[in-house]
Image (cartoon, grey):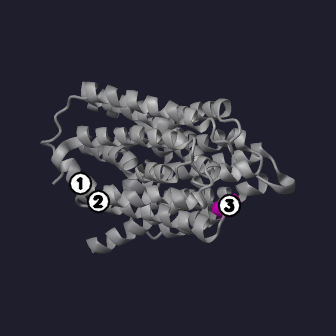
Amino acid sequence: MHKWIKVRLSLMMFLQFFIWGAWYATGGNYMKAHGMADVIYKAYMVSSIGSIVSPFFLGLIADRYFPVQRVLGVMHILSGIFVFCAPFFGEGTLFSPTLFLVFLLVHMLCYMPTVNLAAATAFHQLKNREKEFPIIRLFGTIGWIVAGIVVSKLLQGDNTALPMRVSGIGGILMGLYSFTLPNTPPSGAERKISWRGILGIDAFSKLKSTPFVIFIISLLLISLPFAIYFPYVPVYLSAAKIPDPGFIMTFGQMSEIFFLLMLPILFSRFGLKWVFLVGMLSWALRYALFAWAAPDAVSWMIILGIVLHGACYDFVYVAGQIYIDKKASPDIRAQAQGLFVFISYGVGQGLGTLAAGQIFNRIVKDSNSLANWQQFWMVPLLFSALVTLLFVFGFREKVRNEALP
């Protein structure tokens, strides 16, 4: 029985990230092709806004009154409808950048809570979270890869509305599938509503220590340069004349498979500090490769930088999620995961996206010219290096003995 639950959870994760991956790596080039290059960053702000709103929704409604699978179903169907309709306002007679952005915003307001709800469902159903969750999460990565192959390589849709249409259909299918998932009752029905709990302040207070504070600050800061990646790397690939940017971006998710499989072993052997450190160093190295490659559009360096995504994401975000779950007691586990989403996907990537838009509009200007891309990539390179130094000298917790079983 436990085996079949894992299969069902794996399919859940596949669909969960197929929806996001279908449009997220092509959105920048779609907007550029339809005269919205100067507001690309605003389209990617919506995921951060959704992440900031998500804890309030989860704490006030989803965590108190309804089984998780029902909330997943309703939210995915709504998010699918909105992303499917967004391109109606991105081109043609109904063209309105404002309405296009509004529909993407409402889509992500519905979608982002489901990221945490899907993780909560998996953690609730699994017996050994530390060892089994990375494998379940692996299917989310596969879903993202398949989405990129379908919309970019097979449908050749990098500059079209097709990716958002595919994402919308996937969202509706995921919503219907969610209603069939094992029952996961609301975990907060017996608790009083607390703004401190919703924002994760209570969880932070219970977990607070100097190493944990350094971890949270590092997570926040490394999320800023992360925010540059998905909006502008596909545009950079187009400028470098590398075909099928959305498909090329999936090479990063393909590398995630290897790093996810390695994560339990490395976490057990070396602990959080060294895993997290390698992840942050990977961000600095990736942006260095992009910067060095820019003047002559050296394709192998650009692709190598994309392949590093597995280490960048898994060793920071997935490892951080496991670390927080391991540190938190059962009564604050959900709040702690909400805090993780709020800090990383919400505040960190939100501020990073705002900064990225300003930097891009001031430095690059003409996105088809490679002349200024090197200067553009130097900004996240230097920032990632500084954050890495902060973590190296600030994080002192001994975690090697807290190996994963």
Q: Are marks 1 and 2 in contact (CB under 8 Å)?
A: yes
Which of discs 3 and 1 lies nearer the camera? The answer is 1
What is the crowding at mark 1: few (fewer than 14 residues within 10 Å), some, or many (at least 20)?
many
Give the CA separation, mark 1 to mark 2. Answer: 7 Å
Segment colored magenta:
159-165
The dot on residue 206 is none
**SS at badge 3:** helix
User: How many badges with numbers are in the image?
Assistant: 3
Q: Residues within 10 Å of mark 3 (few under 14, many from 20)?
A: many
Q: Quadrant of the N terminus?
A: bottom left
Q: Position of residue 41 (x, y in %)?
A: 63, 39
Q: What residue is shown with label 2? A: 261
Return the residue nearer the eye: 79 or 185.
79
**Which residue is pictured at 76% across the width and 51% down the height?**
34
Name the residue nearer the viewer: 195 or 54.
Answer: 54
Task: Find disc 1 in the rendering and name its residue.
Answer: 264
Which quadrant of the view contains residue 136? Answer: bottom left
- Marked residue nearer the N-terminal end (3 or 1): 3
Is 284 located above or below residue 297 in the figure?
A: above
Q: Which residue is mark 3?
A: 84
Question: For the point 45% across and 37% down, which residue is it?
Answer: 223
Where does residue 330 sit, x and y in percent of width and height?
Answer: 26, 45
Which element is circle 1 on? Answer: helix
Question: Label 3 sits on what residue type?
Answer: Phe
Q: Residues within 10 Å of mark 2 (few under 14, many from 20)?
A: some
Q: Secondary structure at mark 2?
A: helix
Q: Amino acid at mark 2?
A: Leu
Give coordinates of residue 36: x percent, y percent: 74, 44
Say what amino acid the circle numbered 1 marks: Pro
Query: Could you tell which of marks 3 and 2 lies nearer the N-terminus?
Result: 3
